[in-house]
Image (cartoon, helix red, strand yellow):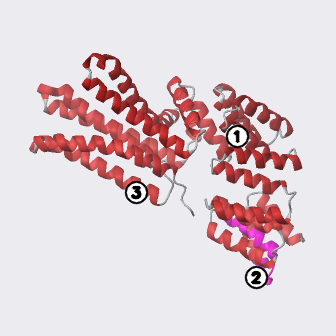
């Protein structure tokens, strides 16, 4: 690598991508056939989220140096960021064909398989990378993460501790060990690990999101919900749907049995009630506890703009539901408790689609869920307004609002799992 390339690489290592891009632009203006410059500027584009330009530059580098495995690996990493997994795998395997002993390529394939929730393959690629370089940090981290996803939490903690001992000054190693501790139920120790990771690298998003979960785990309710998240997260997408639908239809069957056999109703209804509370809580837990976290002197600095907006909107809707219930109770004094619960119930039910909306990726999942949420909100308000003018229609509209929210849960489950190809 000549001095001009070295200077650009140094700027990239310092995360000064704008200056690196200027340097590389000058190089390419003089020599458009410089493959290394195309490769390096692709790195700049990737880190500044200009994925199409990053792809074009990586492809130009490959066209100029088709036998350079680093060019194919760069293209694979860009496709991985774009959620284009098939293209990423093809490019990575071409890089591996050109250089079968490159640990970075195995690390990328481990990342790819982890993103696809293929934990066994992710673990396999991570191990192959570590056979080449036992100190490869990405492979070390992904080995631990894959083990945890496979349910081998004790082994995950041990391997992440081993990786940390090899790389004590690596922020990602601290974060990975902390995640292993958190998933193993040690949220206090996990907080210390995430704190050290953020001390080493305040921009480490992996550590930030882990610290949010660890701080929220100070609350018993969230710890129970987090265990559910960990349990369901270890499963494939299809199996997750089987469990979610099984729980939903299971409680419906129990309700039908209670109606047919009143003697068992006292035993069935508490189960159904617990399911409803559980279902609602799992949806609103993260933004709800993030709202509480904003009053924590450290936690408020961890939340990103979307998480802050989600907590703001949910707090506003919950307050609106309370005010609406109070107003309805004042208007309908003879049945004030019922109408107070209707107003508060509106706010509570609206928290479900709102919370789902904020976890959908930008693009059509976010647009669709936003439209559904707005329509449900308008339907609920229209139903409450109809109580004054068309009482008979109001009941139908309220039922449509309730069942619409139930349907929104399943739609939200699907849309939240969609990874938009960039």
Whether 238 is drawn above or below 5: the answer is above
- Taking the magenta stretch, the answer to whether it contains residue 311 is no
Can residue 136 be seen by looking at this rendering? no
Residue 125 locus on image (x, y percent) = 77, 49
Residue corresponding to mark 1? 145
Q: Is mark 3 on a helix, strand or loop?
A: helix
Mark 2–mark 3 Cα distance, whole angstroms, equals 43 Å
Give residue 186's mark.
none
Question: For mark 3, does the 10 Å Cα neighbourhood hold few (<14), some (14 to 19), or many (20 or more) residues?
Answer: some
Tell me the quarter of the image containing the N terminus.
bottom right
Mark 1–mark 2 Cα distance, whole angstroms, equals 43 Å
Residue closer to the observer: 212 or 20 = 212
- Taking the magenta stretch, the answer to whether it contains residue 45 is yes
Q: Do the residues labelled 1 and 2 touch (CB within 8 Å)?
A: no
Can residue 57 be seen by looking at this rendering? yes
* Quadrant in the picture for residue 233: top right
Tell me the quarter of the image containing the C terminus.
bottom right
Residue closer to the observer: 303 or 188 = 188
Residue 151 locus on image (x, y percent) = 66, 33
Mark 1–mark 3 Cα distance, whole angstroms, equals 32 Å
Residue displayed at 39% across by 32% down: 250
Give residue 368's mark.
3
Q: What element carries label 1?
A: helix
Residue displayed at 23% across by 45% down: 381
Q: Do the residues labelled 2 and 3 touch (CB within 8 Å)?
A: no
What predominant SS class does the magenta segment belong to? helix
Numbered range of the magenta stretch: 26-46
Residue corresponding to mark 2? 29
Residue displayed at 56% across by 42% down: 303
């Amino acid at each position: 690598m000549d001095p001009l390339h070295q200077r650009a690489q140094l700027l990239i290592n310092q995360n000064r991508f704008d200056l690196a891009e200027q340097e590389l632009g000058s190089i390419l203006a003089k020599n458009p056939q410089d493959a290394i410059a195309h490769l390096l500027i692709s790195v700049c584009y990737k880190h500044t989220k200009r994925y199409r330009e990053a792809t074009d530059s990586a492809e130009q580098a490959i066209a100029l140096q088709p036998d350079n495995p680093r060019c194919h690996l760069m293209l694979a990493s860009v496709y991985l960021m774009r959620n284009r997994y098939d293209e990423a795998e093809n490019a990575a395997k071409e890089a591996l064909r050109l250089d079968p002993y490159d640990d970075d390529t195995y690390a990328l394939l481990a990342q790819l398989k982890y993103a696809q929730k293929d934990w066994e393959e992710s673990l396999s690629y991570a191990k192959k990378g570590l056979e080449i370089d036992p100190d490869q940090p990405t492979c070390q981290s992904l080995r631990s993460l894959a083990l945890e996803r496979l349910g081998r939490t004790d082994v995950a903690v041990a391997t992440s501790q081993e990786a940390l001992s090899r790389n004590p000054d690596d922020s990602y190693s601290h974060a990975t060990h902390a995640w292993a501790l958190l998933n193993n139920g040690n949220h206090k120790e996990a907080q210390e690990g995430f704190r050290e990771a953020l001390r080493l690298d305040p921009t480490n998003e992996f550590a930030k999101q882990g610290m949010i979960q660890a701080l929220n785990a100070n609350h018993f309710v969230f710890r129970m919900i987090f265990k559910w998240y960990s349990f369901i997260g270890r499963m494939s997408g299809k199996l997750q749907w089987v469990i979610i639908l099984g729980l939903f239809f299971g409680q419906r069957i129990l309700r039908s049995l209670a109606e047919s056999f009143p003697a068992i109703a006292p035993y069935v209804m508490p189960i159904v009630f617990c399911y409803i509370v559980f279902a609602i809580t799992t949806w609103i837990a993260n933004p709800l506890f993030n709202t509480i976290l904003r009053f924590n002197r450290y936690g408020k600095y961890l939340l990103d703009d979307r998480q802050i907006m989600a907590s703001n909107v949910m707090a506003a809707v919950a307050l609106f539901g309370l005010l609406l219930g109070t107003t309805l109770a004042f208007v309908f004094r003879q049945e004030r408790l019922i109408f107070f619960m209707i107003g508060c119930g509106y706010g509570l039910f609206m928290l479900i689609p709102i919370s789902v909306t904020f976890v959908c990726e930008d693009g059509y999942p976010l647009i669709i869920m936003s439209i559904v949420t707005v329509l449900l909100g308008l339907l609920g308000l229209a139903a409450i307004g109809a109580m004054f003018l068309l009482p008979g229609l109001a009941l139908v509209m309220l039922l449509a609002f309730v069942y619409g929210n139930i349907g929104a849960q399943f739609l939200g489950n699907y849309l939240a799992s969609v990874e938009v190809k960039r």
